[in-house]
Image (tube, grey):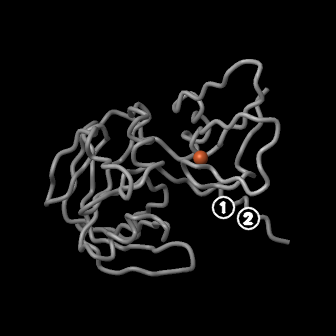
């Protein structure tokens, strides 16, 4: 038998990954070596525009998201593509080593990409940390588990009373109707209908 749900017990955080020309939200980040320039591994979905950009760049930055982050940051970087909008237009950033890092974060790490590994769905980028700073030492980081648990209030999901609604458990998009269409995909984040929760 194989119960892959055990992988949910792997602790993950929430980060804004940026590189030249774009960025997105990632949760699969890990420090994989020690020392003054530790290696940081980050996994990015191949369908993300940021993945494309990373293959053309030699650096990435990770801004660490705190529990008190403005949820607009998660919405802007998590559920949109730079193919459609400019994510940096309404986001306060600062430039570090030519990369944009998010002001409303706990701090950042800038890494030089030294290797990458492709699989069917994701690319694992491995970077050597070259620059880093802490903005809010005393604040707690947002874990992926915390985000999952508090998503509805964070994303301020509200549904109209008296209507049957289906809420996307990933991004909070609301669909009204008795049943979801057979081949329904979330227009915001792209997940299929099994990721929708019914609300009456
Ligand atoms: Fe969605």
* Residue sitting at the far top: 161
Instruction: Say which quadrant the N terminus sits in.
Output: bottom right
Q: Is mark 2 within 8 Å of ligand 1?
A: no
Binning the other alpha carbons within 10 Å of mark 1 as few (below 14), some (14 to 19) or many (20 upward) gives few
| In the foreground, 124 or 90 | 90
Q: Position of residue 120 (x, y in %)?
A: 57, 79
Instruction: Say which quadrant the C terminus sits in.
Output: top right
| In the foreground, 62 or 180 | 180
- Residue 185 shown left or right of residue 113 in the figure: right
Q: Position of residue 146 (x, y in %)?
A: 56, 39
Q: How many marks?
A: 2
The residue to which callout 1 is attached is: 7
| In the foreground, 47 or 14 | 47
- Residue 138 shown left or right of residue 112 in the figure: right
Binning the other alpha carbons within 10 Å of mark 2 as few (below 14), some (14 to 19) or many (20 upward) gives few
As measured in the structure, the alpha-carbon distance from the residue carrying label 2 to the one carrying label 1 is 6 Å
User: Is 120 situated above or below 60?
Assistant: below
Label 1's element? helix
User: Is 59 situated above or below 116?
Assistant: above
Q: Residue at x 77, y 29 (%)?
A: 164
Which mark is drawn over residue 4?
2
Q: Residue at x 36, y 67 (%)?
A: 40
| In the foreground, 93 or 11 | 93
Q: Residue at x 17, y 46 (%)?
A: 94
Q: Determine which quarter of the picture holds residue 109.
A: bottom left
């Amino acid at each position: 038998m194989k119960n892959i749900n055990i992988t949910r017990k792997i602790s993950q955080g929430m980060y804004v990954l940026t590189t030249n020309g774009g960025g997105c939200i990632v949760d699969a980040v890990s420090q994989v070596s020690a020392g003054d320039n530790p290696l940081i591994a980050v996994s990015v979905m191949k369908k993300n525009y940021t993945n494309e950009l990373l293959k053309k760049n030699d650096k990435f930055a990770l801004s660490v998201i705190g529990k008190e982050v403005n949820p607009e940051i998660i919405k802007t970087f998590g559920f949109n593509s730079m193919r459609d909008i400019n994510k940096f237009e309404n986001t306060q950033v600062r430039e570090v080593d030519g990369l944009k890092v998010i002001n409303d974060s706990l701090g950042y790490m800038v890494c030089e990409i030294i290797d990458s590994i492709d699989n069917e769905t994701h690319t694992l980028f491995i970077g050597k940390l070259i620059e880093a700073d802490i903005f809010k030492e005393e604040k707690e980081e947002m874990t992926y588990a915390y985000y999952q648990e508090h998503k509805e209030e964070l994303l301020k999901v509200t549904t109209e009373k008296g209507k049957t609604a289906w809420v996307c458990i990933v991004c909070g998009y609301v669909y009204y109707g008795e049943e979801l269409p057979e081949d329904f995909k979330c227009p915001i984040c792209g997940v299929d209908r099994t990721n929708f929760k019914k609300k009456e």
